Image (cartoon, rainbow, N blue to C red):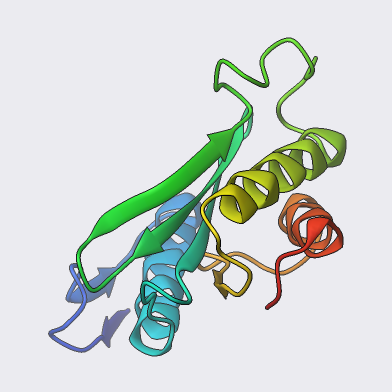
Amino acid sequence: MIQQIGTRFPIDRLTAMNAREQKKVRLVRRKYRIRKRVFGTPERPRLTVFRSHRNISAQLVDDTTGRTVCAAGTNTKALVGQIKNGGNSEAAAIVGRHLAEQARMHGIRKVAFDRNGRRFHGRIKALAEAARQTGLEF
């Protein structure tokens, strides 16, 4: 079964892929759709979240200059002692609080949230809610 995708995507055709490959392709498509709408400025940077099985990280990006304003993750030096397991919601909440504190030190209150193609639940939601409670608006 061949299904045509647009030429904008890195994979032009889906041909007899296994479920894992199809999942990756769908994730890339969602990322492109989201990134068309979400853009970070110096006043309102983009808060982008990356999630793997073992860790979660987030960063504030100013897309006009392509610069990362601040970043936090479960494997950063400041948080390694506080976090036992980086792949759970508690760790994501700690990362969200830490990132919001760093953003406040840089004078940032408002951000545009980029969930990076993932669903807004679980660890992504825990990180976002912790950042909101600490003072970020989105």
The percent position of residue 78, horizontal first and vertical second, equals 62, 19
The residue drawn where x is 38% and y is 80% is: 39
The residue drawn where x is 58% and y is 53% is: 103
Instruction: Tell me: residue 89, above or below residue 37.
Output: above
Quadrant of the rendering where the N terminus is positioned: bottom left
Residue 61: image quadrant is bottom left
The percent position of residue 56, horizontal first and vertical second, equals 61, 38
The percent position of residue 124, horizontal first and vertical second, equals 71, 56
The residue drawn where x is 71% and y is 66% is: 136
The residue drawn where x is 49% and y is 42% is: 71
Instruction: Tell me: residue 49, above or below residue 101.
Output: below
Going by the image, does 38 lie left or right of 107? left
Quadrant of the rendering where the C terminus is positioned: bottom right
**Residue situated in front as seen by the camera: 109 or 129:** 109
**Residue situated in front as seen by the camera: 58 or 1:** 58
Instruction: Tell me: residue 49, above or below residue 47.
Output: above
Residue at the left extreme of this rendering: 7
Residue 126: image quadrant is bottom right
The percent position of residue 52, horizontal first and vertical second, equals 56, 38
Going by the image, does 15 lie left or right of 52? left
Going by the image, does 6 lie left or right of 3? left
